[in-house]
Amino acid sequence: MGVHGDTGCSLFLENEFGVWEIFLPNNADGSPAIPHGSRVKIRMDTPSGIKDSIPAWIKFSVQPPGEIPYNGIYYDPPDEEKYIFKHRQPKRPESLRIYESHVGMSSPEPKINTYANFRDDVLPRVKRLGYNAVQIMAIQEHSYYASFGYHVTNFFAPSSRFGTPEDLKSLIDRAHELGLLVLMDIVHRQDTSSSNFRLK
């Protein structure tokens, strides 16, 4: 395996654990070898032919309007765009009162809600109702929205339907400011069978 356009110089190597990896040093000017926001995928030459896939550890993937496949996005924003947490996680109370929610389905309007709207509109209401924790359901990227988020396509990427990873960090920080613990419903056992995301 190699980097597109540079397969003769930057090959992936298999480590002692069977994981294929590559190290790409920064450019001479100090900028990243892969710019933030670049679309990325891996292409493998296997015994059954060429296979394309979104990298398993991608932190952000999006489905452009009108397109079927998702794109893996290299997500490493510059320091000035990174969200900096301002509030510590509250201490765990003796008795948890958990508000279970789905960010996308939390809008009173017939639309998919966002991390920002959830932060500004839902979290204050959760606090007023007397809860001390919020459980965010189906947070990982998933290709089929009607699955309620349980056909996971990218285990390390929060759903792009609701915003960016920085938007999610802002939501979590606001919850902490309000004294709310944040629990995330992370699905490890259900993934999509779509050939765009898995090798068969």
Image (cartoon, rainbow, N blue to C red):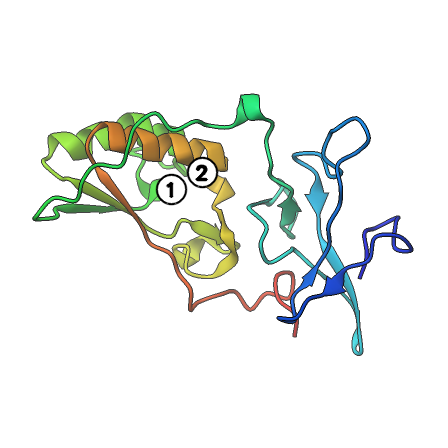
Q: Residue at x 41, y 39 (%)?
A: 112
Q: Secondary structure at mark 1?
A: helix
Q: Is residue 38 left or right of residue 117?
A: right
Report which quarter residue 53 is drawn in.
bottom right
Q: Is residue 161 left or right of residue 78?
A: left
Q: Residue at x 59, y 58 (%)?
A: 56
Q: Residue at x 38, y 36 (%)?
A: 113
Q: Residue at x 18, y 40 (%)?
A: 91
The vertical placement of 135 against 37, above or below, is: below
The vertical placement of 30 against 17, above or below, is: above
The vertical placement of 176 against 194, above or below, is: above
Furthest-bottom residue in this view: 47
Tell which of 175 and 22 is nearer to you. Answer: 22
Local crowd at mark 2 within 10 Å, few (<14), some, or many (≥20)?
many
Q: Mark 1 = which residue?
A: 104
Q: Residue 65, image x and y in percent?
A: 61, 40
Q: Quadrant of the C terminus?
A: bottom right
Q: Mark 2 = which residue?
A: 162
Report which quarter residue 36 is drawn in.
top right
Furthest-right residue in this view: 8
Amino acid type of the residue tagged 2 in the rendering? Phe
The vertical placement of 108 against 46, above or below, is: above
Amino acid type of the residue tagged 1 in the rendering? Gly
Marks 1 and 2, the one that precedes in the sequence: 1
Tell which of 6 and 149 is nearer to you. Answer: 6
Q: Residue 121, image x and y in percent?
A: 27, 27
Q: Secondary structure at mark 2?
A: helix
What is the distance, in whole Å, between disc 1 and disc 2 at their CAs? 6 Å
Evaluate if marks 1 and 2 touch, with contact meaning CB atoms under 8 Å apart: yes
Q: Residue 109, image x and y in percent?
A: 33, 33
Q: Is residue 13 visible?
A: yes
